[in-house]
Image (cartoon, helix red, strand yellow):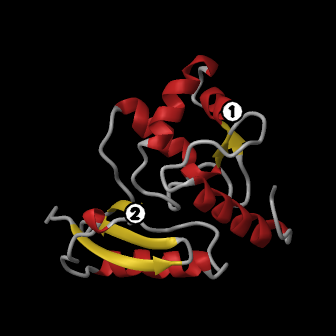
Amino acid sequence: MNEIHFTYYKSPVGLLKVGGTENYISEVTFVDDQVDYVEPTGYTPLLNQCVEELIEYFNGKRLAFDIPVHQKGTEFQTKVWSELLNINFGRTISYLALAKRLGDPNCIRAAAASNGKNHICIIVPCHRVIGTNQSLVGYAGGLWRKRWLLEHENKIANGVQTLF
């Protein structure tokens, strides 16, 4: 019922581990090391839908995801992850702007830390949060991936080749 199943998708930015139950996706993470690899444990309809939506995203045919997601975290982390879903495709906000959206500009460090604990990359778009000075800072998948994802979205949303 709530058993977690995993599969993999070889994306343009590397191997993605996709995990979830029959009711929600709980993980989309980058696999850079054999240590992070676990044998696939079943292919549910929701995992199939998630991989299909990721393929559409990378092909430029999907601007938003429809699949249900769920992550375990503190109340504050959950609030941050929910707010990330409100950042439009092809757009970025600063960590300060994220903190302000959460109602407290002083929570910038806590918001950044929670952003970094997101385990559903791309779908919960933590890559869309950048430094106040427009710099690329902090991405668990590596800054090269963050740049690639932002340029990919910007190109599709605005017809611009590069963002930076």
Q: At label 2, which amino acid type do we have?
A: Val
| Picture residue at 56% right of the left edge, 77% below the top | 12
- Which label sits on residue 97? 1
Residue 2 % position (x, y): 16, 61
Residue that carries the numbered disc 2 in the rendered image: 28
Mark-to-mark CA distance, 2 and 1: 25 Å
Residue 95 % position (x, y): 64, 34
Is the C terminus in the top left, top right, bottom left or bottom right quadrant? bottom right
Front-most of 108 and 85? 108
Is the N terminus in the top left, top right, bottom left or bottom right quadrant? bottom left
- Residue 88 left/right relative to 22: right
Q: At label 1, which amino acid type do we have?
A: Ala
Q: Is residue 155 above or below residue 86?
A: below
Is disc 1 placed on a helix, strand or loop? helix
Residue 132 % position (x, y): 74, 33
Residue 92 % position (x, y): 71, 48
- Residue 37 left/right relative to 76: left
Is disc 2 placed on a helix, strand or loop? strand
Sequence-wise, the earlier of marks 2 and 1 is 2
Front-most of 153 and 142? 142
| Picture residue at 50% right of the left edge, 55% below the top | 124
